[in-house]
Amino acid sequence: MFALLLAGAILGYAAAQARRTHAENQAAYDAFVRTGVAPAAPAAVSGATLAVQERL
Amino acid sequence: MIDATDRRGLGLLGWLVAWMGCAHLVSAALGLRWVQEVEWPTDLLAIGEIARAARVDVAIVGSSRSHYGLAPTAIDACLGEALGRPTRTLAANRLAASSYAADLVARGLFSGERAPRVLVVEVAPESLNEHHFELDYNVGATAELQDVPECVAAAVGGPLRAAACLRPFTRGVENLAFFLHRPFTEHAHITWMARYAGGGQYCFGAPGCQARNAEYDARHAGRWQTRVERVLPKVRRERFVDYHIEGGLPAAHLEALLARAKAEGVRVLLLNLPVSAAYQAEVPPAAYATFLAWTAPVAARHGATFVDLNVPEWQARHLYVDPDHLGAGGSERMSDAVCARLSGWLE
C-alpha cells in the first residue's frame, strides 16, 4: 500500500510540474508571437551548465 | 522449489517492472519523451510541446555541431530579408546524434501534421558509421518501443548492444528522474532559447544576444586546448573504428528519413558541416572518401540536396570554439550560408 501511495505521489508531482512547464512555455511563446518582443536573453552559462558542457 | 524468500524477491521484481511500465506510460503522456540528462537537449521538450499556428519553415536535426553551428534566429533574419516575410526556424539537436537519432527526432517532432517546409539534416562521416561511437546512447535516448525489434536484429552477436536496445522500456523512469531532479528554472537560458530563439546555442538580433554569445565563448576560452588534448587523440580509435556505412542502422535511418520527407513533400538539405583543420587531420581519408561517395548519390536518389561545406575556407581556427564546434562568429556566418541555399526553396 505504501509503495502504491509513493508511486502515485511521484507521478502526480511529475504531472503537475510537467503541466506547469508546458503551460509556461506556451504562454511565453504566445506572448512573443503576439507582441513580437522577447525578454532580454539571460546569461548563457550557469554553474551546472559549465559542468556538463565538457561532454558536448 | 520456491520458498518464501524467492516469492518475496519475485514480488519485488514484479513491483519494479510494474513501476517502470507505469512510469514509461506516464512520462510519454506528460510529454517528457524528449527529456535527457544533459541539459541543452531538453530544449526539445519545449520545441516539441509548443503549439504553433503556422507551419514551420525550416527544421534542423543533428548533433552538437548543428547546435553550435546553426542559429535559427540568424537563419530567420536572413530568410525574412530575402523573402519579405517572417519565417520560423527550429533546431532540435541531440548530443552525439548519429543519423539514427536524427531520423527519430525528425520522425517524432517534424513529421505528419508538424512537417516543416524544409528539413536541414546534419550528416558527417561519424554520424553514418555503422559502428557509431555513441550508437547505444542514441538508441537509449531516442528509440521508441516500435524500434526495439529492428535494433535487436541489428545487434546480433553483441549482447551489450542488444541490451541497450531495451532502453525504451526503462527510459520513462530515467526521464521522470531527470525532469524532477533538474527543474528547468535552473537553466533559464535553455528555456529562453527554446521559447524565443528556436533552440540552438547562439542567438542573434534579440536584446542581450550579443552579450550572451560573447559571455559563452569567453567562459569557454580554454575549451579548444582542452579538446585538442582530450578528444583529438581519440578521434580515430573511437569514431572511425571499423568504419562502414552500408547496412548499418544510421544509414538505414537516414534513408528512412529521406523517404518519409519525400512522401510528405518536405525538401531536405543534407548538410556536411565543417570541422576545423585540426579535427579534419584526424579523420581517416579512406573513411571520409567512403562517406562522400555514399552520401551524394543517396541524397540524389531521394530527391534531396547534399551540400558539403567541410572545405578549407570553413576550417580556420578562429571560427571555432573547439576543434569540431563553430563559435558565435562561425555560427552566424554558417547560418547565412545555409539561408542562401534555402531562400529559393521557400519562395
Image: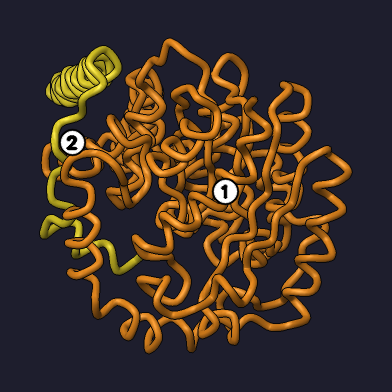
The yellow-tinted chain is A
Q: Is residue B104 left or right of residue B251?
A: left
Q: Cα distance, mark 2 to mark 1?
A: 37 Å
> Which of the 4 quarters of the picture holds residue A52?
bottom left
The orange-tinted chain is B
Q: Is residue A33 left or right of residue A20?
A: right
What is the total number of numbered labels drawn onto the structure image? Answer: 2
Mark 1 lies on a secondary structure that is helix
Q: B215 or B163: nearer the eye?
A: B215
First in sequence, mark 2 or 1: give its number. Answer: 2
Give the amino acid type for the residue marked by disc 1 in the picture. Val
Mark 2 lies on a secondary structure that is helix
Q: Which mark is residue B268?
A: none
User: Looking at the picture, how far across and down is residue B42, in whole percent?
Assistant: 32, 40
Q: Above or below — where is A5 with respect to B126?
A: above
Q: Nearer the viewer, mark 2 or mark 1?
A: 1
Give the amino acid type for the residue marked by disc 2 in the picture. Leu
Q: Report the residue at 29% width, 76% height from top.
A: B223
Q: Report the residue at 48% width, 47% height from top.
A: B140
Q: Quadrant of the N terminus of chain A?
A: top left
Display coloring: by chain
Q: Which mark is residue B180?
A: 2
Q: Are marks 2 and 1 in contact (CB under 8 Å)?
A: no
Q: Chain of mark 1?
A: B
Q: Is residue A27 left or right of residue B319?
A: left
Q: Which mark is residue B338?
A: 1
User: Looking at the picture, how far across and down is residue B38, in whole percent?
Assistant: 31, 52
Residue B165 is at least partly visible in this image: yes
Q: Are marks 2 and 1 on the same chain?
A: yes
Residue B182 is at least partly visible in this image: no
> Which of the 4 quarters of the picture holds residue B156?
bottom right
